[in-house]
Image: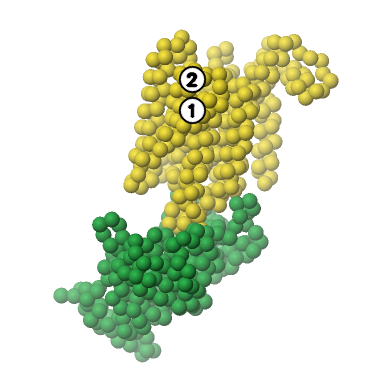
Chain colours: A yellow, B green
Amino acid sequence: MVVLLLCLLVLVASLVAAVRVGLGGGTGWDEIGRSVGARLGLPVQPLPRLTDSLIWDLRVPRVLLAALVGAALAVCGAALQSVTRNALADPYLLGVSSGASTGAVVVVLLGFAGSQLGMTGGAFLGALVSLALLVLLLRRRGLDSVRIVLTGVVVGQLFTALTSLILMSSGDADSTRALTHWLLGSMAPARWQSVVLCGISAAAGLLVVWLCSSALDGLAFGADTATSLGIDVRTVRTVLLVTTSLLTAVAVAAVGAIGFVGLIVPHGVRLLVGPLHRVLLPLSAVVGATFLVWTDALARVAFAPLEVPVGVFTALLGVPLFLVILRKRGEL
Amino acid sequence: MRIEARRLSWGVPDRAIVREVDLVVEPGETVGLIGPNGSGKSSLLRCLAGLRAPTGGEVRYDDADVARWSARARARHVAFVEQTADTDSDLTVGEVVALGRTAHGSPWRGPTATDRAIVAAALDRLDLALLADRPWKQLSGGERQRTHLARALAQRTWGLLLDEPTNHLDVRHQLELLELVATTQQTVVVALHDLALAARYCDRLVLLQRGAVVADGPADRVLTPVLLREVFEVDADVGRDDAGRLAVAYRGPAR
């Protein structure tokens, strides 16, 4: 509980600090205070329109969205690792993110580019299709961890190729830029609309997953022992797979496929508080939020004025960890 | 609670593994399930625990057909210990035993004081109190087995279904575990490999061969040289030691 509160404090401080990072040009704490203060109805001197818009319409939603997406992806990772009994499970590595990308891109192509809800719906369908394909391919084979990740990577590759194909064949001038966005994940297009949608679905999704905490713990010893403990394994699996697909889809529709957050964060948090999900899940959410807020801030300023997609940085951090986990399990 | 199988069958598409088993275990009784490898002991236990839907017949707890019960309802009546249930997770002994309280909890709140007391008692009962904070990966095979049994006790059920719980245990812990199983008020069905221990600690033995019951009764009527030769394919002498306990001495594989 103390750890959770502490991490929450760090998160709030990070949110504020990250708004400031990379603003430059004489814009500082004072301007941020005035922009946010004006929205809260405080008697502050209003900012010039351009600066205010930069802070309130671009920077603030971007930081909030990074926090929401980070929380959602971290919780998805933790839940999927338990459901598949596989330490390497993550929405990105299992190909769910790629499926969601394809779904969202199809919706864009059909002419609903402006509709966040439409893209999220498309991404959700895409995520479910890729997950169904994964389950189909793994049917009747044990959930051996290397096999599941290999299958996931293959499914992911398939959907990545589909996304590229669809975007390229659309012949749009922006298609290359859009491709980077969907495949690598970038916070640049963050707007208030996606913050609201992400906020609502993340809150609902996290609650559903958290309510499954004891079932997630009980799955540690496999389906038979879990059932004998009183867990309806089939229902729990279905609920969790659908919920994580939804959470992944909302995140992907807003910012593209960002990888490895679901791998890095839960593993770190387990070292801190152990594997019980009642504590692991909320803490993963908070740490995941903080993690992505800072990674995105880094992506913004590391090679300024050029902005690197945040997915590049999460992959740079995630790949070594992936190898460490494989090695620890003696599978490399 | 009374556990009953009526003409119970279970199998995979082209192979019957449990064949028309009739079995009644009275409240508080301890029944030993014996039979060679592949005779269907584990599958029968899984059916009795409600983990496999019978392809024929039914399983009844106190005259209620459990086929339509929820997993949660079953878990409040019987606990089951698999032969080898392993995990990659870093759960501690205490956390594993606390899993036994799953069917008694609510998703909205964590463990209650009652849950904690029951877990502590189960740990004590299996001599695990000092190991409560030890991670699963650091446990020996025997400690893992005892942890699972403590978890099953923490479930506080009427029935206990154990699949070779003495595997990996040293002699002392084997005897302690079986003594616990024999003296508990719970209705117990336990699969065992060691025939002498089965004879000594069980009220009754049930002998399985190719999924069917071939003998059911007191140890001295099930463990006969003729049945041992026919079912286990061994030549053995069965007698009594000075204290009157049944003793099985093997002469060798049947020729």
Amino acid type shown at disc 1 = Gly
Q: Which residue is mark 2?
A: A108
Which subunit holds the residue at mark 1? A
Q: Nearer the viewer, residue B237 or A232?
A: A232
In this view of the protein, can residue A54 be seen by the observer? yes
Query: On screen, A17 above or below B122?
Result: above
Determine contact: label 2, label 1, CB under 8 Å: yes
What is the spatial separation of the Cα atoms under label 2 and label 1, in whole angstroms? 9 Å
Q: Residue furthest right?
A: A43
**Does A76 sit left or right of B47 as displayed?**
right
**Does A102 sit left or right of B222 as displayed?**
right
- Report how many numbered discs are placed on residues in the image: 2
| Residue B10 picture location, percent across and down | 33, 62
Q: Residues within 10 Å of mark 2 (few under 14, many from 20)?
A: some
| Residue for point 41% across, 34% down | A130
Q: Which residue is mark 1?
A: A122
Q: Residues within 10 Å of mark 1 (few under 14, many from 20)?
A: many
| Residue B82 picture location, percent across and down | 41, 62
Quadrant containing the C terminus of chain B is: bottom left
Q: Secondary structure at mark 2?
A: helix
| Residue A111 picture location, percent across and down | 49, 17
Query: On screen, B146 above or below A300?
Result: below
| Residue for point 62% across, 37% down | A203
Which subunit holds the residue at mark 2? A
Q: Residue B83 occupies which quadrant of the picture?
A: bottom left
Q: Secondary structure at mark 1?
A: helix
| Residue for point 62% across, 57% down | B111
| Residue B63 picture location, percent across and down | 47, 72
Amino acid type shown at disc 2 = Val
| Residue for point 57% across, 31% down | A69
The mark that comes first in sequence, 2 or 1, is 2
